[in-house]
Amino acid sequence: MREGSRWKKYIGDRAFYKMILAISLPMIIQNGFTNFVSLLDNIMVGRIGTEEMSGVAIANQLFMVFNITIFGGVSGASIYGAQYHGLGDKEGVRNAFRFKLLLSTVLTVAAIGLFWAKGEPLISLYLNEEATTRDIGETLRYGKNYLYVMLIGLPPYAIAQSYASTLRDTGETKLPMKAGIAAVFVNLVLNYILIFGKFGAPRLGATGAAIATVISRFVEMGIILYSVHGKHRITDIFGGIYRTLRVPGVLVKKIAITGTPLLFNEGLWSFGMAVMNQCYSVRGLDVVAAVNIFSTVSNLFNVVFLSLGSAIAIIVGQQLGAGETGKAVDTDRKMIVFSVASCLVLGGLLAAAAPFIPHIYNTEHEVRQIATGLLLISACVMPLNAFNHASYFTMRSGGKTFITFLFDSVFVWVVSIPIAYSLAHYTSMPILPMYLCCVMADVIKAVIGFVLIQRRTWVKNIVS
């Protein structure tokens, strides 16, 4: 009996998993579908040639920094949004949304200005001189064309994320899922038409992929806005939301104290990932192309633990806001175990598929070999990444954003980047062992995360 009771600490009953899936499954479906279509898009561009694929991949490294910075900006306010919802304070949720919208606007204007003025030198950082002049010139041209078109899609993306994150704070995950699926379906169809020039359309290649993505961003935003502001709106949370854009100074101060580390964390972490990939690119354009294949495929398999991390922030955050601290600790423990166990299965599936997926691309044999090796490494460390991701969102749910800042982005800049930079510039180590050394540093992070969770300093109600 005692053995069975011990396992009950880590494994929930049917009602528990039904609750988790009600929140996380729509996000898993949305993110899974989005990443699957991204994989198909990636394959379409990859069918044109390695230079096109590499140019798009490099530009998307820059947009990843923007996307994740927006995520960090809205996440600070979402901590309060989820806990306000648990407390039953609708006006608190509305004020958290207003803060998100204003901050997203500022970040979007800054990003458009930066990418417009410095797009070419930023792309050039990834172009190693060991490649031929033609490879570098063509890759740079494709990357620039893709980047400048994609700038048009930044405002609708930021607006949609502000709305979608607030909907998720209140437990409404189906609408963002539906809007996201509709958008990626539009993106997929338009990619096929515009990249390859089907049905009488011009053959635009990488530029066509950018146009399709921009149109899909407006579709996603339009569906969400119509659903929450239209005649048959699905929630009253956004009722009268624009009577004022003023956010109470007390709440601004609270979100600034709690959310600023989160904003800087996401921005510095995503920038750190871009720097890591730049270190990998020192090994040549074959590595740039292989990393693009690997990251697109692995993102598809990572959607489960990424979505479960967001579910931890929502469910545990609401329980903390409602004052159910004991329940929050129990829920968090079981969700972490569920996430890691899920990734043991998914890691096995990725390892089995790794030797075959790169052959879909119209690229060189060396690129396929490197991509296969990267995917196998990713499959092995997926449970480790799941635990670290769940630990991050556990601490975030209780407002411990400075700790998450140290745990996440500071770790990348103090540990991971020095390892990658040193191996890239001071050794001739091939890319696969180099990448393995970099990812295994996350074992240190897992130990730190385990200790922080056990100490329970994150168990805190920050809104009552």
Image (tube, helix red, strand yellow):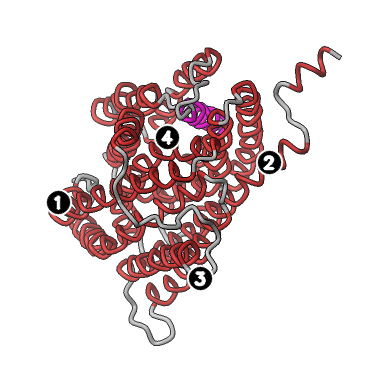
Q: CA separation, marks 2 and 1?
A: 46 Å
Q: Is residue 268 left or right of residue 434?
A: left
The residue identified by callout 1 is 118
Left or right: 350, with 289 as reference point: right
Task: State the mark number for residue 460.
Answer: none
Q: Nearer the viewer, mark 4 or mark 2?
A: 2
Q: What residue is disc 4 on?
A: 432
Q: Is residue 111 magenta-colored?
A: no
Alpha carbon separation for disc pair 2 and 3 = 30 Å
Q: Earlier in the sequence, mark 4 or mark 2?
A: 2
- Closer to the N terminus: mark 4 or mark 3? 3
Identify which amino acid the numbered label 3 is placed on: Lys
Marks 4 and 2, how far apart at CA: 40 Å
- Residue sitting at x 36%, y 51%: 289
**Tag 4's secondary structure?**
helix
Residue 296 can be seen in this image: yes
Mark in the foreground, 1 or 4: 1
Q: Which badge, 3 or 1, is on the more N-terminal residue?
A: 1
For marks 1 and 4, the one nearer the N-term is: 1
Q: Name which residue lies at 55% across and 28% down.
A: 320
Mark 2 or mark 3, whichever is nearer to me: 3
